Amino acid sequence: MRARDARALIRFLVDVLGFEETVVYGEGTRVDHAELSWPPGGGIMLGSVRDPGGASGGDDRWALQPGSFGAYVVTDAPDELFARASAAGAEITEPPHDTDYGSRDFALRDPEGSRWSFGTYRGEPRRT
């Protein structure tokens, strides 16, 4: 995912939502590559949006617009995470609710405008 202010987005994801910073490469305000781990498993990679006329020369294989990302993240404690995010002033787009497929979910937008949905649904078991 790309961000206008990747360092601020990393702080939000770590401090507000509980991701863990694995590695961040870049100088000053620019983030060339960052990896954040989600404690129950998995993680994300992100970096600063690239300037087409800048040092990268427009050669950005991940030319994504900031705010266009969306993800569903599994958590065993959606109500606690909702309380944490709300207390930090996150923009909540859907308060906690129970779904018809048995999940407890809520959703928010990060400071870049991307949508994050958190819930207890782990998906259907793989077929063997």
Image: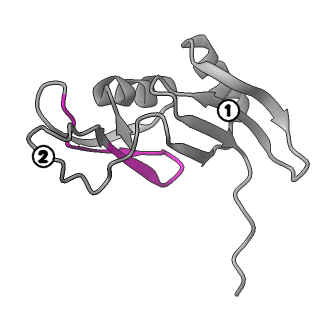
Residue at horizontal 31 percent and vertical 25 percent from the top: 5
In the depicted view, which residue is nearer to us: 76 or 115? 115
Question: In the visual, does 101 lie left or right of 62?
Answer: right
* Three-letter amino acid code at the position of disc 2: Ser
Residue at horizontal 18 percent and vertical 31 percent from the top: 30
Location of mark 2 (residue):
56
In the depicted view, which residue is nearer to us: 9 or 126? 9
Q: Is residue 44 magenta?
A: yes
For mark 1, give the secondary structure. Answer: strand
In the depicted view, which residue is nearer to us: 45 or 14? 45
Q: Which mark is residue 107?
A: 1
- Rendering quarter of residue 3: top left
Region rendered in magenta? 30-46
User: Within 10 angstroms of label 1, few (less than 14), some, or many (20 or more) residues?
Assistant: many
- Rendering quarter of residue 65: top left
Return the x and y of residue 21 as percentages of the image width and height: 33, 38
Q: Please identify the quadrant where the C terminus is shown.
A: bottom right
Residue at horizontal 12 percent and vertical 46 percent from the top: 56
Q: Which mark is residue 99?
A: none
Residue at the bottom extreme?
128
Residue at horizontal 65 percent and vertical 39 percent from the top: 117
Label 1 close to label 2 by CB (< 8 Å): no
User: Within 10 angstroms of label 2, few (less than 14), some, or many (20 or more) residues?
Assistant: few
Alpha carbons under labels 1 and 2: distance apart: 34 Å
